[in-house]
Image (cartoon, rainbow, N blue to C red):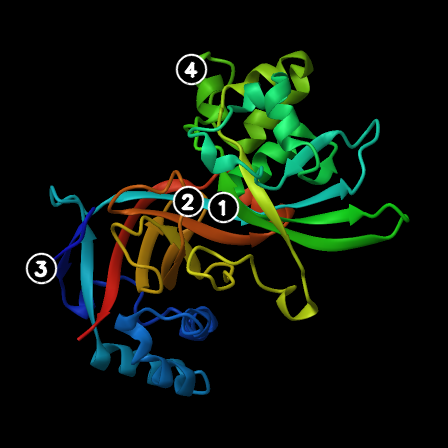
Amino acid sequence: MLQQARSRWTPVAWAELPGLGTDPLGEAWGAWLRSCERPGPTFAALCADVRRLNQGTDEQRRSWMLERLQPYRVETHQSEPVGLLTGYYEPVVEASRLPDARYNVPLYRPPALLHQRKPWYSRQEMDTLPEAQAALKGREIAWLADPVAALNLQIQGSGRLLITEPDGRQRMVRVGYAGTNDQPYRSVGGWLQQRREIRDASWPSIRQWVAQNPGRVQEMLWANPRVTFFQEQPLPESEAAVGPRGAQGVPLTAGRSIAVDPGSIPYGTPVWLASAGPQLQLQRLVLAQDTGSAIVGAVRADYFVGTGPEASAIAGRLKQPLRLWVLWPR
């Protein structure tokens, strides 16, 4: 048994892993190759084999895994092996480089003196206090038309902007996570549920409520004091088909990257994931390549679904039981 800060790992036989013989491992290999761009010391020695097997068959990959890796069931310190799977995605949002009557919701870079005040101003204070607004002046990356889309972008932690430049040209850029105001995260869906405004805390339910209650949107937004700051990133054609860079520092792969609590599972670890629910039936190899402020606990993962509205439809409703096995070098 191996102890981690927030979990313990129990060695098991490969036969315990559901779907081991049927998962198309080639789909996951690209994600593993990306982890090998920035491997931790535990997995660096395996990366030559991982690269070689990129040209192999699924049977060759499976045989190599069984020979070189040992599966461990991830559990809480109280021996509970079942946790929670949620989903996240990369939004695509229209934006403007300059504000106008329509585009009036700013996305900010971190303020220059962010770390001199902890926590920094809350969302409501940023909207109302002159000293907060003065600290943010000139830090705008772009302006959005929809405050709820801006909130969603902050919760997802990254996204793509179809941005209109001052000369009228449109281009796609990526914005990535660059920090927060260190305020606590509070779910606006949970806030609405507590007030019996909605039945489930999914994004479709939240958006329906927003459409019906336009005069209360600001109140809802202020219920979550945390604000995410961004950095603008280029989006070359070579990265157009992959996701944003996660906490490991490598691009995420739709359906094969997860965000984890690094106190339970180190970045770059191959993980066997099993989850069954109304949204997805999953028994597959994934890579631990990201984290998030709400991803805390032993058996906890956020599943990167992909980019755009189709991914949004799945990620916004994904909330189902989860089991995890780390695959650790023998």
Determine whether label 2 and label 1 are within 8 Å by CB.
Answer: yes
Name the foreground residue: 107 vs 154. 107
Residue pointed to by mark 4 = 194
The residue that mark 2 highlights is: 292
Cα–Cα gap, marks 4 and 2 = 24 Å
Residue 225 shows in the view: yes
Kind of element beneath mark 3 = loop
In percent of the image, x 74 and y 55: which residue is there?
Answer: 172
Which three-letter amino acid code belongs to the residue tagged 3?
A: Met
Tag nearer the camera, 2 or 1: 2
For the question of whether residue 221 can be seen, the reply is: no
**Between 173 and 141, which is closer to the camera in this rendering?**
141
Question: Would you place residue 240 above or below residue 305 in this image?
Answer: below
Where residue 30 sits in the image (x, y, percent)? 48, 73
Q: Where does label 3 land, which residue?
A: 1
**Disc 1 target residue:** 88
